[in-house]
Image (spheres, rainbow, N blue to C red):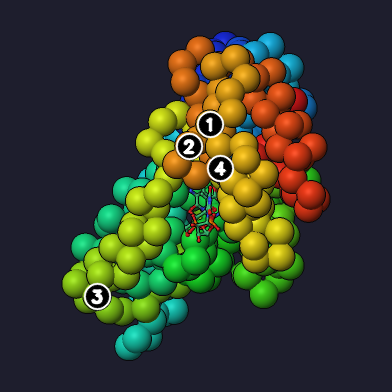
Amino acid sequence: RTGARVERLPLARFTTLGVGGEAEVWFVSSLEQLAEAMEAPYRVLGGGSNLVVADEGVPERVIRLTGPLAESDLTPDPELSEEETVVTGWVGGGVPLPGLIRKLQKLGLSNLEGTVGIPAQVGGAVWMNAGTRYGEMFDGLHTLEIVTPGGTRQVTPDDLDWGYRRSGIPRNHVVSRVRLKLRRSTPEEVLARMDLADQARKGQPKMKTPGCAFKNPGGVSAGKLIDEAGLKGTRVGNAMIAPEHANFIVNLGGASSADVHALLHLIRERVGVPLELEYELWP
Ligand code: FAD
Ligand code: EPU
C-alpha cells in the first residue's frame, strides 16, 4: 500500500449542487498513490462544480487530489521564462482555481483572469477547458502532466484537440499537474480585466448549483433558449430552473438527483434545438 487515505463518504459534501450518495473516496497526494488508486475502476473528482451525482452514489473509487498535488509553485522557471512571458513551476490538479486566480492577479500575471468566478479545481477546469467570454484555461497553459493507468506523460496544448469547453483529454485521464504560461502585466490591469468577467456573472444565481446545465449550441446562449421556452422558475421536487438565468438548475434544499434529471429531460423536450449537456452525470 502506498498510504493513500481511503474513506467512504457522501459525495454531496464534495459537490456544489449538494447532491450525491456515498462512494469510496481516495485522497491521493503523490503519483504513486494515484497509480494505486487507478488499479480498480475509478472516477476523478475535482471541485465537484459540474457534477450531478446519483443519490445512490457510485460504485467506483473516487479519486481526489490532495497534498502536493493540490499545491502550486508559481515561481518563474528561469529557463523557460522570457521578458514578457512567465512559465511557472508546477501547479497541482487539486489546486482550487479561485485562489490561484487571486494569487496571479496580485503577481500581475495575466492570461487566466477571464476564468474568475469558476469554482473548480485546476485539473477539472483544464479537463473541460472551463472559461467565459473573457478567457479560458487553455489561454494560460504551457505543459500538462497526464496520468493514465498505463503511465504518466507530458503534453503541450498543441498536442491536444481542444476547443470550447473541451480539452481533448480522454475521460479518466488525470490532469495531475500543469505549468502555466502567463504574460507579465500589472496587478491593476489584471484586476480590471477580472472585474469585467465578474460583471458578466451578476445575473447568475447564488444558490447551490453545478453551473450551466447545457453548452451553448453554436454560440447561442442555451439559457436564452430555455428562457424563451418559458421554463424559468419551473420546479420538480426541490430542484428549480433558476429565475435569474434559465441554464442554471438550483437546489432549493434537499433536492434529489432524480429531481435534477427530470428538469434536464423537460428542458430537452421543450427546447426545439438539440442541447449538449455540460454537466456530468454520475453514474
Ligand atoms: P468536477 O465537477 O469535479 O468534474 C468535472 C469533470 O472533470 C469530471 O469528468 C471529472 O472526472 C473531471 N476532472 C476533475 N478533476 C480532474 C482532473 N484532475 N483530471 C482529469 N479530469 C478531472 N464553467 C465554465 O466553463 N464557465 C463558467 O463560467 C462557469 N461558471 C460556473 C459557476 C458556478 C456557480 C458553478 C457551480 C459552476 C460553473 N461552471 C463554469 C462549471 C464548472 O465550474 C466547470 O465545469 C469546471 O471546469 C468543473 O471543474 P471541477 O474541478 O469542479 O470538476
Ligand atoms: N439570457 C436570457 N435568459 C436567460 C439567460 C440568458 O435571455 O435565462 C440572455 C442574456 O440576457 C444575454 C445572453 O442570453 O443577452 C447571454 O447570457 P449570459 O451573458 O448569461 O451568457 P451565457 O451564454 O448564457 C455563458 C457561459 C457561462 C459563463 C457566462 C459569462 C456557457 C454554457 N455558459 O453563459 O458559463 O459564466 O457566459 O461569461 O457557455 C458554465 O459553463 O457553467 C457557465 C456558467
What amino acid type should be assigned to the residue bearing mark 2? Pro
Contact between marks 2 and 1 (CB within 8 A): the answer is: yes
Q: Classify mark 2 as within 8 Å of ligand 2 or not, answering yes or no.
A: no
- Residue named by callout 4: 246
Of 121 and 242, nearer the camera is 242
- Residue named by callout 1: 233
Indicate the quadrant containing the N terminus: top left, top right, bottom left or bottom right: top right
- Circle 3 residues within 10 Å: few <14, some 14–19, many ≥20: some
What amino acid type should be assigned to the residue bearing mark 4? Ala
Place of residue 172 in the rendered image (x, y in percent of width and height, measured from the top left): 72, 41
Q: Classify mark 3 as within 8 Å of ligand 2 or not, answering yes or no.
A: no
- Residue named by callout 2: 243
Q: Classify mark 4 as within 8 Å of ligand 2 or not, answering yes or no.
A: yes
- Residue named by callout 3: 189
Q: Is residue 204 left or right of residue 11?
A: left
Contact between marks 4 and 3 (CB within 8 A): the answer is: no
What amino acid type should be assigned to the residue bearing mark 3? Glu
Q: Secondary structure at mark 2?
A: loop
Of 179 and 244, nearer the camera is 244
Q: Write down which quadrant ligand 1 falls in.
A: top right
Place of residue 80 in the rendered image (x, y in percent of width and height, measured from the top left): 44, 79
Q: What's the distance in space between the residues labelled 2 and 1, CA to CA?
A: 5 Å
Place of residue 115 in the rendered image (x, y in percent of width and height, measured from the top left): 43, 58
Q: Secondary structure at mark 1?
A: loop
Q: What's the distance in space between the residues labelled 3 and 2, CA to CA?
A: 34 Å
Mark before the other along the chain sequence, 4 or 1:
1
Mark 3 or 2: in front is 2
Q: What's the distance in space between the residues labelled 4 and 3, CA to CA?
A: 32 Å
Residue 91 in sight: yes
Mark before the other along the chain sequence, 3 or 1:
3
